[in-house]
Amino acid sequence: MFSGYIISVAIFVGIWVALALSLNILTGYAGQVSLGHAAFFGIGAYTSAILSLKYGFSFWVGLLGAIVITGLIGIVLGLPSLRVHHDFLVLATMGVNFVVVAVFKYVDFFGGAMGIIDLPAPSIFGYSFRGGLPYLLLVWAFVAFTWLVSWYVSKTWVGLAFHTVRIDEDAAAAVGVSVPRFKIYAFAISSALAGGAGCLYGHFIGSVFPDTFVFAESIVILSMVIFGGVGTLRGPILGAIILKAAPELLRFVQDYRFTIYGALLVLMMIFQPMGIIGDDSFLWRLLTRQRRNKEVKA
Amino acid sequence: MPFMQNLSNAVVLAGTYILMATGLTMVYGVLKVLHIAHAAVYTIGAFIGLLVFTWIGNFWLALAVAMLVSGIVGVLIYRSTYHYILDAPRTVPLIASIGMFVMLTDLLQKKFLMGPYPKSLPVGGAGLPRIETPWFSLTPKQLLILIVTTVLLSIVYLILTRTRIGLGWQAAAMDQDMAAAVGVNLNRVIALNFFLGSALAGAAGVLVGVYNNNVFAAMGDLPSYKAFIIIVLGGMGSLPGTIIASLLLALVENFLVAAVGYVLPRDAIAFSVLILMLMFRPHGLLGQE
């Protein structure tokens, strides 16, 4: 019914939707702009690769391990955010990305520049699946999980606390919100989810290489969040779908991928800093106008 | 390697860092924007230098044209992007700057511009002699970097301290609104700021291209990250701090890395230093609160 190619594209899109949603928790909700998200993506992929190949655990343990361990590392690497603010935090996260990739590349335990290959495919009751519809369902189940976490966070007091930290840290502290605690929460949740996405990526490709998780990939993930609409539940999904599917399906876009990502970031910042369907964006106002008009009449 | 030779090598290396970081410091000093696209300007400078040199064959002309074009590119980047978003939260111009950097670097890699492969820039020493002293020796290329750096920095220093518009720049760096209130033409000052800073970055690009006899599209990446380390070390927006921090980084690279060997590559160490610096001395070695 579906060709293998379309399924592969849909799997990739799913993994990047999960990445964009997870970065959105950190950047959109808690206001901590990070250019190091690919590092956590990579840590997840490497964790599960090492758990399954060196220690012989199953894929499912690997997935759980990737989520937990990446979350814990996220707490440690999030520590600079307690001292460093705004644009300098961006520099620090950029540095984190470089250091993590260098560790993958130059420490033998992580396989060096050749990476780790022959990752096993997940299996349930002896039925193994690599690629294909079952894996697609698994990936999108994880996307749904990520979305649910984002939704839950945005609807509870944690979301409110993130909101106050984003708007004004001093005011947040003044009304009793522990700013350091919630920044670390945001780093932990965000990186744990990125770790899960990394595990799904590694086991789909069947190998992990340090060069997949470089700074440029962090820019791509941030572009998706910002292009779609930072701080919303819908924006990062649309951003990731468009920016991931377009290069796969259109030849021209593939050749000029980074030119287009870069130009989009510049144009969005000048004209629509809230993203194409973010709150208060032109398109979103247009789309919701009818509904709002109805509400007014009723 | 003897101590004095290491020292003179470090000073030469610092020269290119200073040229690169001065522009960033000037932009940060006046606009409070971390100008990541500066790296693309550096690469454009090297590229223009290469074009003019292969076309005409005169190094000094190539350097001058490269600086002029880089300066204009810098002003264009400001007028097309930052100009509109200066009042937005500080991450907005930063993200725009990253976008600009990614876009320009990717475009430069295309076949109709620099192409994906490195190209050589065989200037040699531009006719300069080799300096031999009992303690250290300077190759013609090193001498070239020292002379160009010293001359350009002196010119920028004179412009910033002895001319009307330079005084305007100093005023704007202290307090933009106040400067505007006493009649400083902010648009002109900021344009000058970008022009001078970008011209210096272009010169740095040409010099490094000549020094390594190598010009390629991604050559700006590493120097620009190092330049950020330098402006953090130097205390954000302080020109003397930038010069001292450049020397310090070059010295550390030349002495420490050679002495210790490495577990991690140099750049990972440099970034670890940056992160620690941001955490424990966020205002730089010399900067004040």
Image (cartoon, rainbow, N blue to C red):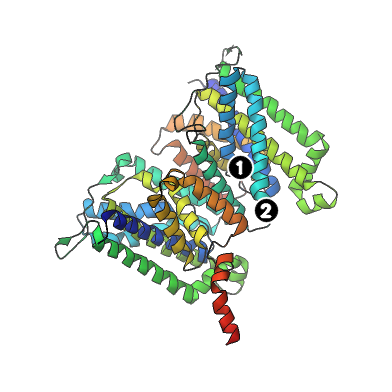
Question: Is residue A65 or residue B101 the one in the foreground?
Answer: B101
At a point 49% along the width and 76% down the height, the residue shown is A157
Residue highlighted by disc 2? B84
Direction from residue B166 to residue B70 in the image, left or right: left
Of labels 1 and 2, earlier in sequence is 2
**Vertically, is B265 above or below B179?**
above
Q: Position of residue B204 (x, y in %)?
A: 60, 30
Mark 1 residue crowding within 10 angstroms, few (<14) / some (14–19) / many (20+): many
Kind of residue indicated by mark 1: Ile
Q: Position of residue A87 (x, y in %)?
A: 58, 53
* Residue most extreme to the front: A1
Q: Position of residue B276 (x, y in %)?
A: 51, 48
Q: Position of residue B102 (x, y in %)?
A: 52, 44
Question: Is residue A271 or residue A125 the one in the foreground?
Answer: A271
* Residue most extreme to the left: A126
- Is residue B102 in view from this perspective? yes
Residue highlighted by disc 1? B231
Helix, strand or loop under label 1: helix
Quadrant of the image occupied by residue B242: top right
Q: Chain of mark 1?
A: B
**Vertically, is B191 above or below B13?**
below
Cα–Cα gap, marks 1 and 2: 25 Å
Direction from residue A245 to residue B139 in the image, left or right: right
Direction from residue B189 to residue A34 in the image, left or right: left
